[in-house]
């Protein structure tokens, strides 16, 4: 028999409001993405508008001197002054028009845009169309170019492409003609494009190069007949099989290394990806470091004064203004005003949160900014979280994808976080320092006798850094350095 019962249970659940979710999303944006997000909001919310008049730099304190107690006190005061709760609980929010201008100025300095580049596909198609081929071969060439992977290799078998043409277009192209067209495309700029494997790619480049014919011939023979021996650095075997001197093999090796194993790589990279826009700038001025949020190019947003007057009450008569606005329009405007208030509060809260985190990182890694990489300290998100009183997830959102420009160069914020490794003197060093040491040792190793992972671990142990061989191997792989056997040079 089926029984039905009711039960009353009390529980507590923590849920984020839509506004809190919006704030967390804004934290994740870097400078370029955040600028685009502001522009999107300006388009979506008619109540918001961009303040076109540029404010004076002195109107807004954007810099923070981390070595000055007075500047730190001012920064803490700003942190107390601006919060979402203050914005939302302020009954006089609509009373002053000046409150709507955000506290960051615009930078109208001319910054030339990177000119649009011709993509790799467009570059290849233009060369294809210049051949004045039949319509059938043009279609085949377009399909070949359309089936190239990121490295420039032909992903699909040529027979499959011909089968597609037969099924979709109703005509056949002979395999010999297709192969001839493919070989022609492989000589396009960049040479070696549309190859089917690495051997073919290197051979095509050698056959179309202007290198010394003697060394080029030996290089072709090595790639065609002794590719495995060359890939595995079996130099003695190559010298014996080809009956050449070590000096000749060294010259041929240098020639092969001039070839491009990935002719298509980087062909379609967007222009905006060619540069990094730092989110923070750290400068040393008069023996003091100043931390600046790089937000001067962001649009300065404000509330549209016309819409503001439509819903404001007359402070003297305590009645609606004479402008008659229907109920639906008034409801719509109030909703948009509420959305605008939250968005503007989120912008200011985001700014203060970013600066808090950056200041905390700077204080922990002060020696790095002052003296260099060898002074990088171990640091984890939890330390910053406890210091500024924010959740670890907030720290993660701030750090991810953000960059800082300092006297030591441009670094992603995640660069400053790493686990510690114990040393003989009882201290800890960042694992990034261990990676730098490994790279230095490998850079200085003998060409004919590279250091193995075991030997690297022994050297580090002798210096008081306790790491296992597998840890050395892991760090070496993260540095994209091959094993000792493949680092052997002639």
Image: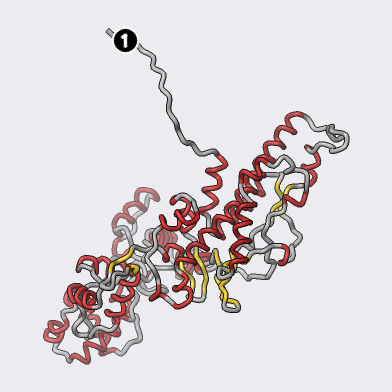
The answer to whether 466 is drawn above or below residue 333 in the figure is: below
Q: Residue at x 57, y 67 (%)?
A: 291
From the viewer's perspective, is 440 left or right of 231? Answer: right
Relative depth, front residue between 478 and 104? 104
The answer to whether residue 224 shows anywhere in this view is no
The answer to whether 301 is drawn above or below residue 279 in the figure is: above
From the viewer's perspective, is 20 left or right of 46? Answer: left
Give the quadrant of residue 442. Answer: bottom left
The answer to whether residue 478 shows anywhere in this view is yes
Q: Residue at x 74, y 33 (%)?
A: 329
Instruction: Assign a secondary structure to mark 1.
Output: loop
Q: Residue at x 55, y 47 (%)?
A: 23
Q: Name the spot of residue 152 as percent of width and height, x first.
A: 37, 66
**The N terminus lies in which quarter of the figure?**
top left
From the viewer's perspective, is 428 left or right of 60? Answer: left
Q: Name the spot of residue 399 as percent of width and height, x first.
A: 47, 58
Give the quadrant of residue 137. Answer: bottom left
Residue farthest top in this picture: 1
The answer to whether 264 is drawn above or below residue 315 in the figure is: below
**The C terminus lies in which quarter of the figure?**
bottom left
Estimate how packed mark 1 is, as few (under 14), some (14 to 19) or many (20 or more) residues with alpha carbons within 10 Å: few
Relative depth, front residue between 254 and 453? 453
Q: Name the spot of residue 316 as percent of width and height, x first.
A: 87, 37
Q: Which residue in the structure is indicated by mark 1?
A: 3
Relative depth, front residue between 375 and 54? 375
Q: Name the spot of residue 432 as percent of width and height, x first.
A: 35, 69
């Amino acid at each position: 028999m089926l029984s039905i019962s009711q039960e009353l249970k009390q529980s507590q659940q923590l849920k984020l409001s839509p506004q809190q979710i919006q704030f967390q999303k804004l934290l994740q944006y870097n400078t370029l993405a955040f600028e685009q997000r502001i522009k999107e909001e300006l388009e979506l919310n008619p109540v918001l508008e961009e303040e076109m008049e540029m404010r004076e730099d002195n109107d807004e304190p954007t810099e923070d001197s981390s070595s000055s107690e007075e500047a730190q006190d001012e920064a803490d005061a700003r942190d107390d002054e601006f919060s979402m709760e203050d914005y939302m609980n302020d009954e006089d929010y609509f009373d002053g028009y000046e409150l709507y201008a955000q506290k960051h100025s615009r930078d109208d300095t001319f910054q030339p845009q990177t000119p649009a580049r011709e993509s790799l596909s467009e570059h290849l198609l233009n060369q294809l169309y210049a051949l004045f081929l039949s319509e059938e071969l043009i279609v085949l060439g377009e399909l070949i170019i359309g089936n190239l992977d990121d490295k420039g290799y032909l992903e699909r078998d040529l027979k499959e492409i011909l089968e597609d043409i037969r099924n979709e277009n109703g005509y056949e192209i002979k395999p010999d003609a297709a192969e001839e067209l493919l070989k022609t495309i492989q000589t396009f700029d960049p040479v070696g494009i549309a190859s089917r494997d690495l051997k073919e790619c290197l051979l095509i480049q050698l056959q179309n190069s202007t290198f010394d014919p003697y060394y080029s011939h030996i290089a072709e023979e090595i790639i065609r007949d002794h590719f495995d021996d060359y890939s595995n650095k079996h130099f003695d075997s190559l010298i014996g099989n080809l009956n050449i001197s070590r000096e000749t093999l060294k010259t041929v090796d240098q020639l092969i290394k001039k070839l491009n194993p990935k002719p298509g790589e980087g062909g379609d990279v967007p222009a905006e990806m060619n540069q990094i826009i730092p989110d923070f700038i750290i400068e040393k001025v008069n023996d003091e470091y100043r931390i600046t949020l790089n937000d001067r190019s962001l649009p300065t947003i404000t509330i549209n004064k016309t819409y503001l007057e439509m819903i404001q009450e007359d402070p003297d008569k305590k009645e609606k203004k004479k402008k008659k606005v229907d109920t639906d329009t008034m409801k719509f405007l109030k909703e948009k005003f509420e959305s605008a208030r939250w968005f503007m509060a989120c912008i200011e809260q985001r700014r203060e949160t970013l600066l808090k985190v950056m200041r905390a990182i700077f204080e922990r890694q002060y020696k790095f900014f002052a003296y260099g990489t060898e002074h990088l300290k171990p640091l984890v998100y939890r330390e910053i979280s406890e210091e500024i009183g924010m959740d670890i997830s907030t720290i993660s959102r701030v750090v991810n994808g953000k960059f800082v420009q300092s006297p030591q160069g441009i670094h992603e914020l995640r660069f400053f976080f790493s686990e510690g490794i114990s040393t003989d003197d009882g201290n800890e060093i960042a694992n990034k320092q261990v990676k730098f040491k490994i790279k230095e040792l490998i850079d200085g190793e003998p060409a004919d006798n590279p250091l193995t992972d075991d030997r690297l671990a022994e050297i580090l142990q002798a210096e008081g850094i306790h790491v296992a061989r597998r840890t050395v191997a892991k760090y070496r792989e993260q540095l994209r350095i091959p094993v000792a056997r493949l680092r052997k040079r002639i």
